[in-house]
Image (tube, rainbow, N blue to C red):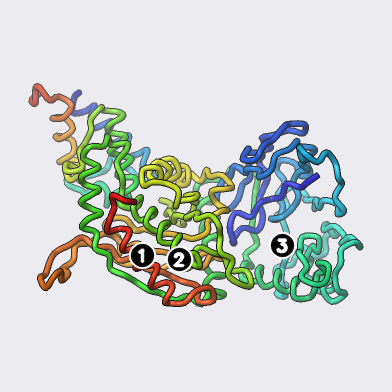
Amino acid sequence: MTHDEIYNTVIQLLKEIAPDTEPGQLKPEENIRQALNIDSFDALQFIVALNTNLGIEIPEEDYEQTTTLKRLLPYLEKRSNPKSENS
Amino acid sequence: MTEFLMPSLGADMEAGTLVAWRKKPGDQIKRGDIIAEVDTQKGLIEVEIFESGILDQYLVSEGESVPVGTAMALIRSAEAPSSPEEKEPLVPEQKEGIPEKEPLHPILEIEEDKREEPEDLPTVSQRIKASPLARKIAAVNKIDLTSLKGTGEEGAILRRDVEKVLEEKEPAKTPPSPTAAPRSSESAASEVRKAVASAMSRANQEIPHYYLEKRIDLSNAMEWLRETNKVRSVKDRLLPVALFLRATALALDLHPTLNAVWDQGVQVQNEINIGLVLSLRTGGVVVPAIQQADTRSPDQIMQELNELIPRARALKLRSSELSTSTVTVTSLGEAGADKVYGIIYPPQVALIGFGCVVEEVIPIKGMLAIRPVVYATLAGDHRASDGLTGSRFLGSLDQFLQTPENL
């Protein structure tokens, strides 16, 4: 899966969870949950939605990789293409 | 024949608008069926029926808005074919588009600008036993006597019965503005705001609150959650709130006077239905019930939350989920305030609050340790319980949370 595909999926899922916000305007280092006002329940829904849409199970100890786009996107890319990390 | 009434979905609800019937006359209906969709301040609610029978006829048509307690349909009971009720069902005729005027408006009458309109409340049947004074007060305040339960001899309605209704209605002066048209999310939000305002004003006026708090060491609970979530798929993972709710239910079972409603005395409830406060993104809160939480495992509670919370946030709840709470829990989740001192949702008598889980230095066996803790608070109605009960409840809550594997 390409960087753009992952980015678009993430933004779309965030929009579904926080429909009154503009996830597309998130800055790379902005804290996603704070910026979009996402509570712990919706944060879990986001992790579930990533699993459903990208087939990636994020273990709890990796939750900190989901705090900003700058961390989340490379993490998802790596996990979606486990064999060739550069693709 | 029984009447299907516009349900009260909380102390703050005065009227609702019938949006659609989901059953038609002649339909066989059973307990739990969704019979109608009703638009309220808390969104579009699917209303369930609590008895079985056959839908006989509609008394209210789609688009009409009627006060709580209005008969909306007649149900022929399955067992007893026909035993016509003494009293006639009430169907106040509503003019299209005119908001329901307050049927129980108390002494303050500034807003009664529609008074000149033709009487549209049914005349009180002479068969109702009521004292002349009660009748007079009821007439002045446009209270429908058929909706009252008398406490006098042979159920006669007395002055105090009518005044009680007036008192109950007093704080909720904001006239509801129900509308059959689909609402924008903004107007839905402002309706929710109004509903919250009305219920909380009433609670603050009527309920003598007392507050207690207890710091609860969550080392065991958080460690247990970490371990169990490791082996769970993302969909089955538990949040701390599932343990909080379960432990609360078990502790309430030991201290039942907190799981009660206040109606001229404490009435302990048989079921433990925990209303969970959910904030809406657009502001305001809704409080759907986790029914019989004491009989459910943390897993079952979490599954229920996964199903309930998205529907609650979309304001698509069922009537039973909004009307059956016997106690309320508010949990602030992560990154929120450390402690919450809630306001009780009448007629309930207790509200339990959980702040966010924080790490604190606490002494353990003469040493200082850093442990995850949560501050649990209890708002109690001092008419219904005392600090000792509340204190024991928080102690039990603490104990249950120390052995998460047994929850």
Quickly name the residue at label 1. Answer: B396
Percent x, y for residue B181?
Answer: 63, 43
Between disc 3 and disc 1, whose residue precedes?
Answer: 3
Q: Tell me the number on the disc at residue B255.
A: 2
Which structural element holds mark 2? loop
Q: Please state the chain letter of the residue tagged with numbered disc 1 in the rendered image.
A: B
Dot in front, 3 or 1: 1
Depth check: give the residue in front, B101 or B25: B25
In the rendered structure, are the residues bearing label 1 and label 2 in contact, judged by CB atoms less than 8 Å apart? yes
Quickly name the residue at label 3. Answer: B102
- How packed is label 1: few (under 14 Cα within 10 Å), some, or many (20 or more)? some
Q: Please state the chain letter of the residue tagged with numbered disc 3 in the rendered image.
A: B
Between disc 1 and disc 2, whose residue precedes?
Answer: 2
Percent x, y for residue B326?
Answer: 52, 59
Q: Residue furthest right?
A: B126
Alpha-carbon distance for marks 1 and 2?
A: 9 Å
On whether disc 1 and disc 2 are found on a single subunit, the reply is yes
Alpha-carbon distance for marks 3 and 2?
A: 39 Å
- How packed is label 2: few (under 14 Cα within 10 Å), some, or many (20 or more)? some
Residue type at mark 3 is Glu
Q: What residue sits 52% from the left and 64% below the top?
A: B345
Alpha-carbon distance for marks 3 and 1?
A: 44 Å
Q: Is residue B370 left or right of residue B386?
A: left
Q: Quick check: can you spot residue B110?
A: no
